[in-house]
Image (tube, rainbow, N blue to C red):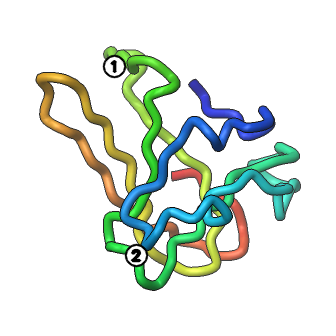
């Protein structure tokens, strides 16, 4: 970690689910729409959730190995750039563990926000 969209083909280690067909063009690396401010990277991932998708549509990857949570390292963060206010979710699952899922809405549109 962190997941870095600057690496070509990084999007191919992820699998979409519940997105009304999981078309590849709905999960692609693109040029960053706003490189000023908190996200100055050149590339980002664009995930288009279709109107027909299930409310739990998302993407999953096991390419990054296990995550170990400690007293010092216990926070997951995601930067989002959205044109609507809606929930963003992160879910962590592991063998023999209850899943942990956090859903929070973004609070700004048309700009990067760290959640």
Give the residue drawn at x 69%, y 60%. Answer: 112
Give the residue drawn at x 42%, y 19%. Answer: 73
- 43 to the left or right of 2: right
Quarter of the image for residue 74 reads: top left
Give the residue drawn at x 62%, y 59%. Answer: 24
State the residue lying farthest toward the bottom. 51
Residue 83 position (above or below residue 13)? below
Question: Toward the viewer: 16 or 5?
Answer: 16
Upstream in the sequence, badge 1 or badge 2?
A: 2
- 28 to the left or right of 73: right
Q: Circle 1 sits in a helix, a strand or a loop, which is it?
A: loop
Quarter of the image for residue 98 reads: top left
Frontmost of labels 1 and 2 is 2
Q: Circle 2 sits in a helix, a strand or a loop, which is it?
A: loop
Question: Toward the viewer: 87 or 38?
Answer: 87
Give the residue drawn at x 59%, y 69%. Answer: 48
Residue 74 position (above or below residue 11)? above
Callout 2 crowding tier (Cα within 10 Å): few <14, some 14–19, many ≥20: some
Spot occupied by residue 1 in the image (x, y as percentages of width and height) = 57, 24
Residue at which label 1 appears? 69
Spot occupied by residue 99 in the image (x, y as percentages of width and height) = 20, 39
Spot occupied by residue 21 in the image (x, y as percentages of width and height) = 46, 69
Q: CA distance from mark 1 to mark 2?
A: 32 Å
Residue at which label 2 appears? 53
Residue 60: numbered disc: none
Callout 1 crowding tier (Cα within 10 Å): few <14, some 14–19, many ≥20: few
Residue 54 position (above or below residue 1)? below
């Amino acid at each position: 970690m962190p997941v870095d969209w600057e690496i070509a083909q990084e999007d191919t280690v992820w699998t979409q689910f519940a997105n009304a067909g999981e078309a590849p063009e709905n999960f692609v690396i693109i040029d960053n729409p706003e490189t000023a401010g908190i996200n100055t990277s050149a590339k980002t991932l664009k995930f288009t959730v279709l109107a027909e998708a299930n409310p739990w549509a998302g993407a999953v990857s096991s390419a990054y190995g296990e995550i170990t949570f400690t007293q010092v390292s216990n926070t997951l963060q995601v930067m989002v750039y959205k044109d609507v206010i809606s929930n963003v979710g992160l879910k962590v699952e592991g063998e023999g563990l209850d899943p942990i899922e956090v859903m929070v809405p973004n609070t700004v549109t048309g700009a990067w926000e760290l959640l």
